[in-house]
Amino acid sequence: MQKVAVLLSGSGRTLDNFHERILAGTLQAEIKVVISNIADALGLVKAEGYGYPAFHAVGNAAVNTILAGYDIELITLAGYLKLYQPPGQLKQRVLNIHPSLIPSFCGDGFYGHHVHEAVKARGCTVSGCTVHFANEVYDEGPIVVQKCVALDDADTPDDIADKVFAAECEAFPEAINLVDEKGVAYFWNR
């Protein structure tokens, strides 16, 4: 079972997903702490409601100071909209979800709705999500899980976002379970 920190910037929909799957016994994780760089993020309110320690912190140093008080094995970036640099002992233990099939529509500036608008503008017939380990460059760490979704010509960016988020709800827990099963080093060394 992975001891997890959740970093978020928004509504906490991914936190909801994690919490529900932990309760159902289908996610091999224990959430130790939730941190947001946005003081009034709905995700922090949800975390408190679930009984998780919840903090607002701006910047890597502040986040890492909070993390130092918890026994963490894996940091999950659940809609965290900043480039995060973990402390040395957690350097290869940061897992991110990206709303496209990397290497398409990724890198600096490609996040959230920007991705779905670009997918629509390009006329893609598929999109999806990628769970990957994060490093010091946006969206370049080793890939753990990818899920593909079919798109219709009539899909709007909002429709694409809904389809991709449904895939994310499956992919992120699957990735955490794979990391729990195979270990972090497997993905960095394969």
Image (cartoon, rainbow, N blue to C red):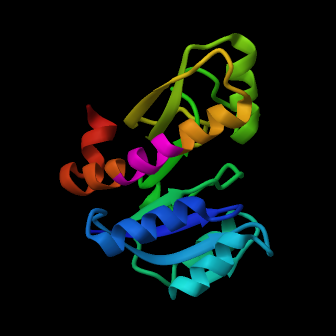
Q: Indicate left or right for 139 with 27 as reference.
A: right
Outermost residue to the front: 154
Residue 21 visible in this rendered orientation of the protein: yes
Above or below 33: residue 176: above
Q: Indicate left or right for 168 with 3 as reference.
A: right
* Quadrant where the N terminus is found in the figure: bottom left
**Which is nearer the eye, 37 or 163?**
163
Residue 102 visible in this rendered orientation of the protein: no
> Residue at 74% across / 66% down in the picture?
37
Q: Indicate left or right for 113 with 126 as reference.
A: right
Above or below 107: residue 92: below
Outermost residue to the left: 181
Above or below 35: residue 160: above
Q: Find residue 46 and report its image quarter.
A: bottom right
Q: Find residue 26 and report its image quarter.
A: bottom left
**Which is nearer the eye, 106 or 16?**
16
Give coordinates of residue 114: x percent, y percent: 76, 33
> Residue at 61% across / 82% down in the picture?
54
* Quadrant where the C terminus is found in the figure: top left
Magenta span contains residue 89: no
> Residue at 59% across / 18% down in the picture?
152
Instruction: Please provide the residue range marked out in magenta.
Output: 166-173
Give coordinates of residue 129: x percent, y percent: 50, 35
Q: Find residue 67 and report its image quarter.
A: bottom right
Q: Look at the magenta stretch and give its main secondary structure.
A: helix
Above or below 97: residue 89: below
